[in-house]
Image (spheres, helix red, strand yellow):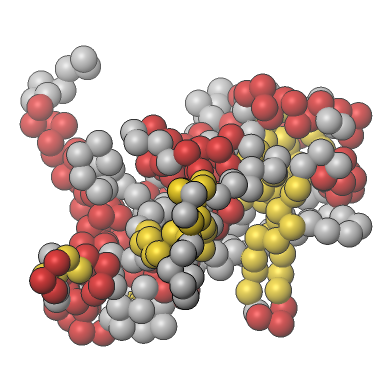
Amino acid sequence: MCVTGCGSWEGVMSGWILPQAELGPFLQTVREQMQVFAPTAVEAEGLCALRPLNGAIGPPDTEARRTMLPPKKLLLPNNETLFTFDAEGYHPAPVDDAPTVLFGLHPCDLRAISLLDRFFGARIADQRYVQRRAATRLIGADCLPDDACFCHSVVASEPRDAVYDLFLWSLEDRFWVTVNGESGAALIDLDRKRFRHPRPADRLALQRRQQLRARMLENGRARRQARGDAQWSWREWSAACFTCGACAMVCPTCVCTTQEEHPSLDGASGERVRRWSACLYQNYDRAAGEHHFRNERMERARNRFEHKMLGCGVGEEGVKCVGCGRCVVNCPAQLPLGEALERAAGNLQRAQAIKAAAANPGGEES
Ligand code: SF4
Ligand code: SF4
């Protein structure tokens, strides 16, 4: 924790200063070694997307809005051939694991990647994910929340809760760059001359930025609470939900996929493809004999949102929502998803506190 009592942990961490004007040239140097993706405004579509940085690099927009699709799209592509087959047998499809930097990821998205790493890497490894992830470096950037953000309520608002190689704190005309591990230091070493050591004024500016961000997150929570909680029953909820799955498609932590086989017309060859899917879809859990484990829309809606808060079974417990707000801004039925998820997170935290107190009635430290 910060020795000044500002409530921050970052203030005491060592870092580098990168003048804002040097960010473009630094990324240009990085791009000589790896492909770089960054949030890019797509005005024609009125959205922000994670796209390759091509051509001359001006200063990237570090205050960019949330991208519509999460960085997951580059680690677990939406439409991916797993293998092809023919008379000779099965042939694994090559994995695109070119060295890549994902730039400008907000803390919620970095937290989401740490959850994906656990899901696809730790227990039963998905080799395709693991291979791509090993070739990927993450450069995070702080952000100021809008009204749909509630990362703060699900413990995903700080880079310390996540994975990253470099993290940029925006200090007006410069960035405070926090370095995580050897891979982060190696990125700095690609163009070390553009960075300088921090001075006391930089540390003060960093604390002010972190305090501003923390205040905005807290004010947002207070505003939503004042508006009143989303006290809908699951039945009311599901009556209004289209089960379109948009909330799952844009979610950085949803991991449901489906596999399809595409045979050639003569049946002599084909391919197996993996696509994103959603447990909200009625066909997602269709079993033999047209049996469905969750046939009713209400059951599927509850299943998805409870999984976001409670996890997906043994070894996968814990909150899977990172409060990015993508489902909030992309739900065509304009359901109050943020309020509902934030309320569920609050209930969960209270239940955990009661359980911890019951397990340790004297309050002694273990
Ligand atoms: S985006 Fe909204 S309407 Fe569509 S499935 Fe999700 S909650 Fe339902
Ligand atoms: S459930 Fe909604 S707010 Fe939570 S991580 Fe997914 S898209 Fe973001």
Nearer-the-camera pick, 134 or 90: 90
Tell me if I can see residue 227 in this picture: no
Tell me if I can see residue 67 in this picture: yes
Q: Is residue 361 left or right of residue 17?
A: left
Q: Is residue 24 left or right of residue 63?
A: right
- Residue 327 x, y percent position in the rendering: 42, 68
Residue beneath the point at 16% across and 32% down: 356
- Residue 228 x, y percent position in the rendering: 28, 72
Q: Is residue 305 left or right of residue 162?
A: left
Residue beneath the point at 8% across and 31% down: 358
Residue beneath the point at 59% across and 46% down: 95
Would you identify the image quadrant in which residue 307 lies?
bottom left
Would you identify the image quadrant in which residue 233 lies?
bottom left
Q: Residue furthest top?
A: 366
Nearer-the-camera pick, 169 or 261: 261
Can you say whether 178 is above or below 339 in the image? above
Would you identify the image quadrant in which residue 139 lies?
top right
Residue beneath the point at 72% across and 78% down: 43
- Residue 283 x, y percent position in the rendering: 25, 73
Query: On the rendered image, what quadrant is the C terminus found in?
Result: top left
Nearer-the-camera pick, 74 or 210: 74
Nearer-the-camera pick, 281 or 85: 85
- Residue 196 x, y percent position in the rendering: 85, 28
Q: Is residue 23 left or right of residue 186?
A: right
**Labels in figure, total:** 0
